[in-house]
Amino acid sequence: MRRVFACLAFLLFAVPGGGVSFDYGLVPRELAPGVYVFVGTTEDFSTRNGGNIVNTGFIVGTGGVVVVDTGPSLRYGRQMRAAIAAKTEAPIALVLNTHLHPDHFLGNQAFADRPLGALAATRSGIERDGNAFAENLFRMAGDWMLGTESVPPTLELAEGIREFAGRRLRFIALKGHTDADLAVYDETSGVLFAGDLVFNGRAPTTPHAEVSAWYAALDKLEAITREPGFRKLVPGHGEVAQDAAPIAQTRAYLRWLEREFAEAAAAGLDMNEVLARPIPAEFAALGVVATEYRRSVGHLFPAAEQKALGRGAAR
Amino acid sequence: MAALVLAVVMLGEVLAAPVDAADPLESARWGDMRRAFFADQPVVFDARVKVVAPLDAENPMQVPVTVDAAELSDAREVFVFADFNPIIQVLRFYPERASAYLGFRIKLQQSSPVRAAVRTGDGVWHVGGTWVNTVGGGCTAPSAAATSPEWQRRLNEVSGRQWSEGPLAGRVRMRIVHPMDTGLVAGIPAFYLDELEFLSAEGVLLMRVQPFEPVSENPVFTLQQGAPGRVRTMGRDNNGNRFEAWIEP
């Protein structure tokens, strides 16, 4: 009974305006002069983290600020915008979404008065699926999502170097994690925002992955890390790195998944048997690897299976 | 609760009528399932009927289910159902010469027990099952085929393979292109495979499968045949489209 009262009390005081503040605690970390990142946890979406499992950032130029991804919710977007305003008085010149996954764009609402840009396929993907993604996050992150609606980007970004807000930004149009993955390299500081093409210490997610394209994208990003001006790599999830190690880790994990599923399919395993296979020691320490592996079985095993079954049947 | 169960058991003894054991999955729907599908036939919960499925299904459109009742002798019919699905009946299969073993994937609309009831030669239904938690929507989301015309050219296209060596010797896997539309999506009528047979090269029936709407789009079946050899598979959907293919060793 006491527990019931405790729950009721929690409800009374936790409702908006009450005791629970839904504060993401966003503190920008300066990676280089004028280049900041908000580093999220390496967990899955939950009512505890409110979806703050993602890295977002911003680059301050003389003429304005470029925002890289907007987080999982309206609240996140608002808090992020406040944190940016606390660092600089410069206006926000451009807000971009690296790709169409909800933790990277559902904060757009807080920037709806600014130019929102993304690659063409990201834009159309958010237009198509944005609200379905939002609904799913409501289910997983609860009240942190209050009031969140999908606001698709309107500006179409293309690959190339752009003098933007007084900085030299290189937009790199890639794919593999999704149909369109935008990486941003700030040539002025040598900071590379890789989006979800790169994970660090957390298992990559694969719901829209095309693995062969993903490898090619990783090669291109790795080439940037070999440029003399390169300083830091910001993965979509996980700690910021000073080298290409997270790229190698992401590649190794994807290679393992691909090999694992091809071998399992060739051996005749059914999906349940693939789900039961162990995670090798090399990847066992990655954040949420058990969950992501199971998801990837659903995403990627059917194609491997189809390839293995393709032989042997006569019409 | 324990007292209640005891009371029911005692009442059963008084009336000298068979009383079922409590549902190990504690589903509120079990009583309805019992009445609807088994009426006055004897039912026992039996650990030898193994239903393997993930506790948390990531994709409600493709929930892998493996039914293994090979430990039971004389299995004649296996009925697979999900208590809380809008279409409860998932499939039936009749093992004949093959093992009472079948792997497939299903659509789940919400979290539900997934059960297999195996009828042995003596008429007793042996029931096993497992709970599957899912985000739902599996039965009322359109199939991929419903949004793309490509499947029409490939309808009932079969691919398959056999494994004759190693731990999985005797395994046959078969995939068939079919939308398996449930009829629960507005404007898309039910369209699903409802008859499937696996036969030996000599024409001996190895297994008959009767899928219902909840079987996933582009079904994949995994079975264990008794002895290696060419397998012929044939069947049809509820619109009368037939297919036939050989799966070579």
Image: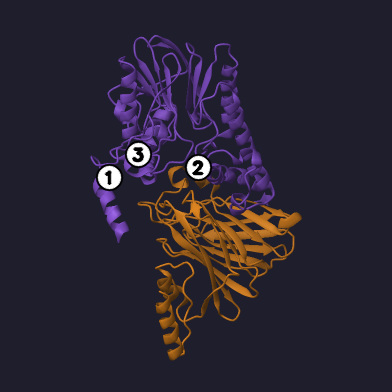
What residue is shown at x 61% (from left), y 46% (from top)?
Answer: A306
What residue is shown at x 50% (from left), y 37% (from top)?
Answer: A208
Identify which amino acid the numbered label 1 is placed on: Ala
Chain A rendered in what hue?
purple
Identify which amino acid the numbered label 2 is placed on: Glu
Which quarter of the figure has residue A213?
Answer: top right
Which structural element holds mark 2? loop
* Residue A37 at x, y percent in the picture: 43, 24
Mark 1 chain: A
Where does the C terminus of chain B fall, quadrant-wise? Answer: bottom right
Disc 1 and disc 3: Cα gap in Å?
26 Å
Give the residue at the far front of this rendering.
Answer: A2
Q: Which residue is mark 2?
A: B150
Which structural element holds mark 1? helix
What crowding class fits label 1: few (fewer than 14 Cα within 10 Å), some (14-19), or many (20 or more)?
some
- Establish if A76 lies above or below B211: above
Closer-to-camera residue (B30/A7): A7
Chain B rendered in what hue?
orange
The disc, 1 or 3, on the residue closer to the chain's N-terminal end is 1
